[in-house]
Image: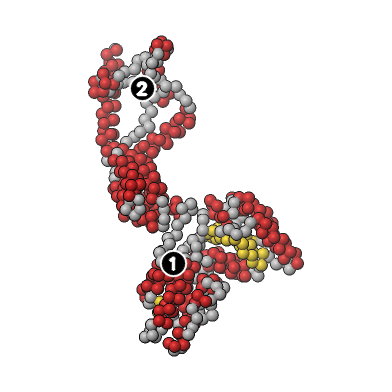
């Protein structure tokens, strides 16, 4: 085809449906990725070969082929396929599908595959509405979700489904998909004879971030831009998609993230564990991953404040001050200037000595209090502001520490039932080493006094 013939071709935006929909695979031969499920001898390839399809939950990030895979599976068993959106439909539509499934089974002996997109958006009552029909085998359920099904799918329904995990597509899978889209003249962009540059393909793969649908959407817009530049630049022989076209089409890379979903907790967990393991590079990476994805910085501040007490404590007493100052700095500066204060706090926490002694003490104390209940305060530790309370023995026997040698007194500060219990055991890291040494010396002094007192009685 000559340059002049190419210039008369229509823009890809004039197509009746999006490129991502037109390029949806229609068979396993066209399906890219998910080899752990579809490879020889793997679960789904075995199921398709046997012609028996169990109820499934397909769990994975967007654009990994969940809907496509469900359609291919249904077709492999010659079942009637019903697409159902948990966002747009409700229980009323479920009843209509049940009636249709019963009719097909009775009149044609034909099975139904009931595909529910975003099944995590159904509440418990809605999920319970189709549970009996899954149990009876009236239809095979395939649910697709980007959220952890153990949190969002009811236990009875989950127990009747096989959970299959789909992963973000690898770079080579995306490369195959994008090249196929440029070459396919029937469903793709083949009629336009578009070409990638090496940089533009790499840029597109990066922006897609493992999501084929996102990548194809960007590619479709970039192709339109490339054709426009080709039409307006007479000396170009073929339309070429450049990195600038990809960048303009993609605008800003949208990282996979859901503030209320599993990825939110995965990232904050990665940040917390990197801090605990004293890795400032890992901690900074996860911090900026969260910030770039749109996480609320003050939420991160709150987690850093908690970390300062939970994983550092008095091993470095300045850690808590640093995190509170970080929160105040961000509230004063806002974004983006204030994010550097978060980075400073993260580096400080990552490089500070670590101790969970306070966290352990808290856990032990709560358990002890639960077991022993409301033990009364020893009389010598009670105040006696009235004469009646003095007569009752409030404050009797209390020793004032400032009147004693070295400010140390020999008296119990716990209920008698817990006398001698040690809850706080400092480590030998950071400032806690000083505390540990100090407590050890104090206990030795008090123990020596006790021995001397007992010896004087004999």
**Please, is residue 248 above or below residue 339 in the view?**
below
Which label belongs to residue 412? 2
Residue reaching furthest to the left = 406
Residue 208 shows which numbered tag? 1
Residue 245 at x, y percent in the picture: 40, 73
The chosen color scheme is secondary structure
**Structural distance between the alpha carbons of marks 2 and 1:** 65 Å
Point out the image quarter for the C terminus.
Answer: top left
Q: Is residue 51 visible?
A: no
- Label 1's element? helix
Eyeballing the image, is 141 above or below 324? below
Q: Nearer the viewer, mark 2 or mark 1?
A: 1
Q: Position of residue 428 (x, y in %)?
A: 28, 39
Q: How many marks?
A: 2
Nearer to the camera, 39 or 396: 396
The quadrant in which residue 435 appears is top left
Task: Give x and y (percent) for residue 293.
Answer: 41, 57
334 or 151: nearer the eye? 334
SS at circle 2: loop
Please report the residue visible at 32 percent of the width from the left and 41 percent of the height from the top: 320
Residue at 48 percent across and 85 percent down: it is 8
**Residue at 54%, 58% in the rendered image:** 145
In the rendered view, does 262 fall on the left or right side of 243? right
The reply to whether residue 364 is in sight is yes
């Amino acid at each position: 085809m000559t340059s002049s013939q190419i210039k008369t071709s229509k823009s890809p935006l004039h197509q009746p449906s999006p490129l991502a929909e037109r390029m949806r695979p229609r068979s396993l031969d066209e399906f890219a990725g998910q080899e752990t499920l579809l490879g020889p001898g793997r679960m789904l390839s075995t199921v398709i070969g046997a012609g028996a399809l169990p109820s499934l939950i397909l769990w994975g990030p967007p654009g990994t082929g969940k809907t496509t895979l469900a359609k291919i599976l249904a077709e492999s068993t010659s079942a009637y396929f019903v697409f159902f959106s948990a966002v747009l439909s409700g229980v009323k539509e479920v009843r209509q599908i049940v009636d249709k499934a019963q009719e097909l089974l009775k009149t044609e002996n034909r099975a139904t595959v009931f595909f529910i997109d975003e099944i995590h958006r159904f509440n418990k009552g809605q999920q319970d509405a189709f549970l009996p029909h899954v149990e009876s085998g009236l239809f095979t359920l395939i649910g697709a979700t980007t959220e952890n099904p153990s949190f969002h799918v009811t236990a009875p329904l989950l127990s009747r489904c096989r959970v299959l995990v789909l992963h973000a597509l690898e770079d080579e899978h995306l490369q195959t998909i994008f090249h196929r889209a440029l070459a396919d003249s029937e469903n793709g962009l083949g009629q336009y004879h578009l070409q990638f540059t090496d940089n533009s393909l790499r840029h597109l793969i990066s922006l897609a971030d493992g999501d084929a649908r996102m990548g194809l959407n960007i590619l479709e817009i970039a192709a339109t831009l490339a054709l426009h530049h080709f039409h307006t630049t007479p000396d170009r022989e073929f339309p070429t998609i450049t990195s600038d076209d990809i960048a303009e089409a993609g605008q800003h890379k949208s990282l996979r993230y859901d503030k209320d979903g599993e990825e939110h907790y995965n990232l904050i967990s990665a940040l917390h564990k990197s801090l605990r393991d004293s890795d400032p590079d890992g901690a900074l990476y996860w911090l900026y991953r969260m910030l770039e994805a749109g996480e609320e910085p003050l939420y991160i501040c709150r987690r850093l404040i908690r970390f300062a007490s939970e994983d550092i404590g008095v091993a470095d007493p300045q850690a808590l001050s640093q995190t509170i100052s970080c929160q105040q700095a961000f509230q004063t500066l806002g974004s983006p200037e204030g994010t550097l204060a978060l980075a400073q706090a993260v580096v400080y926490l990552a490089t500070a000595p670590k101790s969970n002694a306070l966290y352990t003490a808290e856990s032990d104390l709560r358990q002890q209090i639960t077991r022993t209940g409301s033990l009364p305060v020893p009389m010598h530790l009670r105040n006696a502001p009235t004469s009646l309370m003095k007569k009752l023995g409030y404050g009797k026997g209390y020793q004032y520490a400032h009147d004693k040698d070295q400010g140390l007194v020999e008296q119990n500060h716990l209920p008698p039932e817990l006398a001698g219990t040690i809850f706080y055991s400092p480590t030998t890291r950071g400032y806690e080493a000083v505390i540990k040494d100090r407590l050890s010396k104090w206990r030795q002094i008090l123990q020596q006094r006790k021995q001397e007192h007992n010896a004087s009685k004999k």
